[in-house]
């Protein structure tokens, strides 16, 4: 049987993210952008190195400990939306707050729907929404628990130019309102230009 070997995706990557900072991550396909996001969010574990959150080392935490921590401290916005198909727009937004046993989950979700001008879509299922509407719902879901970190992986990748601009404006507005750090993977030079700092990955390392 052939032996297995480790192929490093990231090499000697060290990053510090400040509270409230908007950081864009760029690089060619396969450079390690999504892997870096997954490691920072505790979705994957590094073979070497540590992941610290406010001084707490979360590298070796079990999933049972990480899952509620992520739900409270982190929000996620993906290119493919990942809304729950059987839940309405309002219910999708409420979901993280309900996991947090927040009794104000519904009122918070309703307020967020109003902010993104989708209150008339509250009872619609995801398949009844456009791509831009789905992404606005996903952003509301990401911020309902007022996370410290928002991770966004190509959040405008599946949208046309007009909807991309709308979604981007809402995402940055929400990030600033909630005082969260935003870590966003993008191929867009325009979006990167709006950030406080750009990190470029090349072959798994930070390009100087």
Image (cartoon, rainbow, N blue to C red):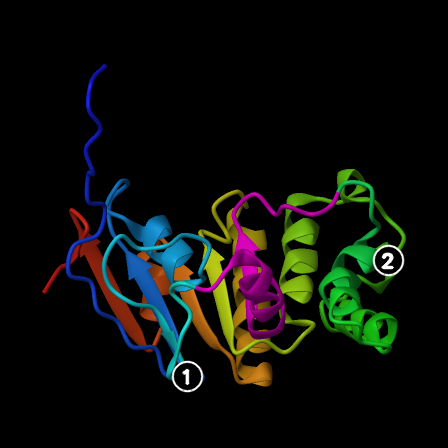
Question: Mark 2 packing: few (<14 Cα in 10 Å), some, or many (20+)?
Answer: some
Quadrant for residue 92, please give it. Answer: bottom right
**Residue at point 21%, 52% (across, down):** 10
Q: Which residue is mark 1?
A: 54
Q: Which residues are magenta?
A: 61-84
Q: Is residue 54 left or right of residue 170?
A: left
**Residue at point 43%, 85% (across, down):** 19
Question: Mark 1 packing: few (<14 Cα in 10 Å), some, or many (20+)?
Answer: few
Residue 12 percent coordinates (x, y): 15, 61
Most extreme residue toward the left, as rendered?
208
Residue 118 percent coordinates (x, y): 79, 61
**Residue at point 77%, 38% (across, down):** 127
Judge whether residue 202 is colored magenta.
Answer: no
Question: Is tag 1's residue or tag 2's residue first in the polypeptide sequence?
Answer: 1
Residue 138 percent coordinates (x, y): 65, 57
Quadrant for residue 65, please give it. Answer: bottom right
Residue 174 percent coordinates (x, y): 59, 75
Q: Which residue is mark 2?
A: 122
Q: Is residue 160 left or right of residue 134?
A: left
Q: Nearer the viewer, residue 157 or 151?
A: 151
Quadrant for residue 140, please give it. Answer: bottom right
Q: Nearer the viewer, residue 167 or 2?
A: 2
1 or 2: mark nearer the eye: 1
Q: Note whether 58 is above or below 30 in the view shown.
A: below
The local secondary structure at tag 2 comes to loop
Could you tell me which quadrant the N terminus lies in? top left
């Amino acid at each position: 049987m052939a032996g297995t070997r480790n192929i490093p995706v990231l090499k000697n990557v060290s990053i510090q993210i400040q509270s409230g900072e908007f950081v864009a991550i760029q690089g060619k396909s396969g450079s390690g952008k999504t892997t870096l996001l997954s490691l920072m969010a505790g979705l994957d574990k590094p073979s070497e190195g540590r992941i610290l959150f406010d001084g707490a080392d979360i590298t070796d935490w079990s999933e049972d400990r990480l899952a509620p921590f992520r739900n409270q401290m982190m929000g996620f916005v993906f290119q493919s939306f990942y809304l729950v198909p059987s839940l309405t727009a309002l219910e999708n937004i409420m979901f993280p707050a309900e996991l947090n046993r927040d009794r104000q989950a519904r009122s918070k979700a309703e307020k967020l729907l109003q902010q993104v001008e989708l209150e008339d879509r509250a009872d619609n299922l995801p398949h009844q929404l456009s791509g831009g509407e789905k992404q606005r719902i996903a952003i509301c879901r990401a911020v309902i628990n007022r996370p410290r970190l928002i991770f966004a992986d190509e959040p405008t990748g599946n949208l046309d130019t007009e909807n991309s601009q709308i979604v981007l404006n809402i995402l940055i507005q929400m990030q600033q309102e909630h005082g969260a750090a935003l870590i966003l993977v993008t191929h867009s030079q325009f979006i990167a230009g709006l950030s406080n700092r750009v990190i470029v990955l090349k072959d798994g390392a930070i390009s100087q």
